[in-house]
Image (tube, rainbow, N blue to C red):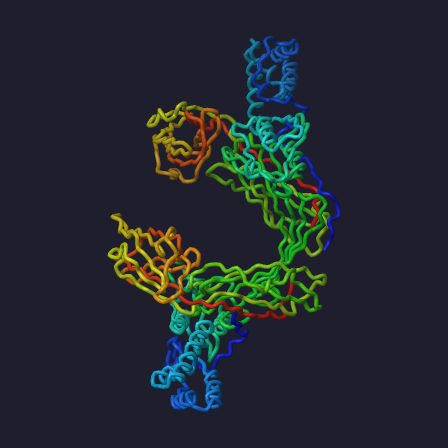
Amino acid sequence: MRRMGCVFGVVLACMCSGLWAQSSPPAAIGAAITATAPTATPADLELIRRLGDSDPAVRQAAQNDLDKKTWRDLDSLRRIADRATDAEARARVEARIEDIKDDLAVNPPPVSMHLKDASVDDMDKALSKAAELSSPYIPWPPTDARMGQPAEFYTLDATDEPFWQVFLELSRQHGLYLQGWEANRQIMHNTGTGWRRGVISGPLLVVVDNITYTRAFNFQQDGPDQAHAERFSLSGTAAIDPRVKILRSSSAMFSEITDDAGNDLLAQPPNDLMMSGGIVQAALPLNCELRMIEKPGKKIATAKGYIHLLVEVRSATVEIDDAASKVGGSFPVGRFTVKLGNLDAKPGSISFAVSMTDSAGVIGGIGRVVRGQPDETQSVTCALMDSSGKLLHSVRLSAGSSTGAAIGTQYTPPLKFRLSAPTKVKDVKIPFELKDLPLP
Amino acid sequence: MRHVHALFLAGTMAATAVAGRGAAPAEGPAGGAPAAVSTNDARWTDLARKLADENPEQRNAAQQELEKANWRNLPALERVVTAVADPEAKARLSERIAAIHEDLAINPPPLTVHFHQASLQEVAAVLGKQLDTRIEIFPEPIPALDIGSFTLDATDTPFWGIFLQLSRQHPLQIETGLSTKGTMRLVTNGAGWRTGVLAGPLLIVPQTITRSRTLDFQDDGTPPLEVMRMTCLWAVDPRVKVAQMGSMGFSSIVDDAGKNLLPEAAPDGRVVFSNVTMRTVYTNANMALLVPEKREARIASAKGFVQMAVALQNAQVEVADPGAKIGDSIPVGGHTIQITSFKYLDTAQPRVDFHLDLDGGPMAAPARGPVGAPPRAASSASGTRVEVTTIDATGREISHAAFSAGGFTASLGGFTAPVKLRFNLASKTKEVKIPFEFKDLPLP
């Protein structure tokens, strides 16, 4: 057997968009997107003029400059759009603003975090805040269960780093990984090594846990040929930035795996089937069988793959405040209507039932999918929150279905529902590449 | 603790059955009960007389002869003991009869079968009859998936020896029945159990040895981890009622170079037993091995043992009309069961809900044993477990489960009313340690 000969190389792969390749963004995207300066700058005015110039060459050059604008320029673009009197110039700027916002849905901006000897709980809060998560991370095991264990402290100075880069740096201090989704996002502590090394590609983190070569002898098979079995497999995880709202996802899959001897190690072609229904987990398994080669190389030279996502880019959102007083009510969201059938809130427990009709007025039973395959673009996400904004539960209703839940949780009344129906979605394939993975 | 030898050396003939196309009817009994084919009542009557002889030497010689009696002599011994008047001779004979019964509970007698191009259904029927166990075939056989026929002549062969010979013809394995069926399943769509070691009532099946080499990319600088694991299972003759299952342990595993492959020898002391139902047939085991330096090595010898507690006596009580017994104390093997509720629900499909308590329930004072017996701990402390089987009006078992001091609650559907309850309790158990040895196992 060979010894591990070289260090696992991490490669920042090609991105699904060019956002990450651009200059360092500001720390708080929320502030960057919403703040509006009172007046346009001379540069803004000049761009407006050029976009409306009578010379097509000047207009094209201005458009090229406009296309280079990123989310960092959203403020100035809004100023430009407000000041533009030329209809074409205004339309071009507004179109660019929409493109940038679409891109942000898939490629959330980097984060900044500054910690010095922070506790587990403080670190989790800081990470949730830095990423502006609507539902913060819950440390696991919970605080009480960690009593008596060696304390973990985190120190980090990260400015404008990809979310996953920040996460990996924290995990290298004390092994961490993520699991769960939305209302159940958890940072797992005391997990051994955790995720320490990975490839970051846009909103995607690819973590290879291990490569295992297995040789087995099965005593119940006839003959040595049948009895001996060999297996070569790669095991890991693909995680999507928690700010990306995924409606549907494929598995993370490999399309090419080649060792340094030029052998093709990919045992099976990628299966691009998107899993549908339900809420997509924060971390998806990445498992791959490798081909057995008579004369394998010493390492995987390159392993290229991708994950296929359907991402919510825009949504119609409705909030039902003091939901307990509105049981029986119907609430339009997008082109759907959600009916709040029941909400029974007791100290420490809540049960509720909601149903959804589509534009044709079709309603189904619990869990029923009227039109066959669930279609997440035809869905409404019902998030139950308390008065402090704590997300208690999140469920996705398919068109023409109804559902409910019984939750045991502490909360601060009154309760409210946030209903959200996607109005614009984006189908994206996020590529990644792993390089120089030693073979066992 | 009694040791049972690895090789099953019971006598010359037990039950005999013949199955197959054109097969002749069997001579002798076809059931599972031991048959006295070499009956010689005069021999045992004479021995009984010597057991009561005034000469101590005569008595000792007779006792030594009596110790040689085995299950084949049981019918004769049981006939003779009823006719013996001398108290000492009667006591000695009775003691030997009890010892043979105890041995049979752990080491059921061998079987004799003759199959000639027999279908699996015919094989299952014959084996089921001899084992006194209902055997179903899974998946349900259909002509398109006919696995073929079996031909076997086996005389005085342990059940598992017959099973292995059949499985080598067409792969078979066993599953303990589903709780709703209470049967043993002969499974035809698995890999089958084709090779194994017989040890008393056990079949020890080595399944796989796996050697893996893993490179962990999240652990800094660690060299590849190489591990070897062995999986095997052990199956108990279905006639043996296992009250508690211990674990499998190995005392030595040596490769063909004489190198030790056992990370740590199993402790020789008492093992932790886990509760099972008396219908449990097999259990899996998985253990780590040391990785030999040499490739292409073989395990020269792997010596191990299985420990279990066998039910020697089983108290069984059947309650035909449970709804009429609510609140009654039902004695079972020195314990009492109370049916605290029993109600058929008024639903479209028949349903029944009931609750049972053992020895007054979890909060009861320590229960009293039978009259004259020393006081014993409450069920919660003694670990007493009662098996309850629910049987519908057609005789079909719809549920089988075990419960202890915590009580038992059931909500059952899918039956033909009325139902009855059958309680089984292992009233006498014996821990046994059965050694075995694997030899010459190839390593991956």
x, y percent for residue B295 = 70, 62
Left or right: A86 as drawn, with respect to A301: left
Asked if B87 appears above or below A168 in the picture, the reply is below
Residue B118 visible at all: yes
Q: In the rendering, at what x and y percent does residue A99 appear? A: 57, 23
Residue B187 in sight from this viewpoint: no
Please identify the quarter of the rendering in which residue A339 is found.
top left
Residue B195, picture quadrant: bottom right
Q: Nearer the viewer, residue B93 or B286?
A: B93
Residue beneath the point at 71% across and 44% down: A301
Residue sitting at x 50%, y 61% = B283
Name the residue at the right extreme. Answer: A5
The quadrant in which the C terminus of chain B is found is bottom right
| Percent of width and height locating residue B132 | 38, 71
Whether residue B109 is situated above or below residue B225 in the rendered picture = below
Q: Is residue A211 above or below residue A79?
A: below
Image x and y of residue A44, in percent: 63, 11
Answer left or right for A59 relative to B64.
right
Give the camera-side residue of A135 and A413: A413
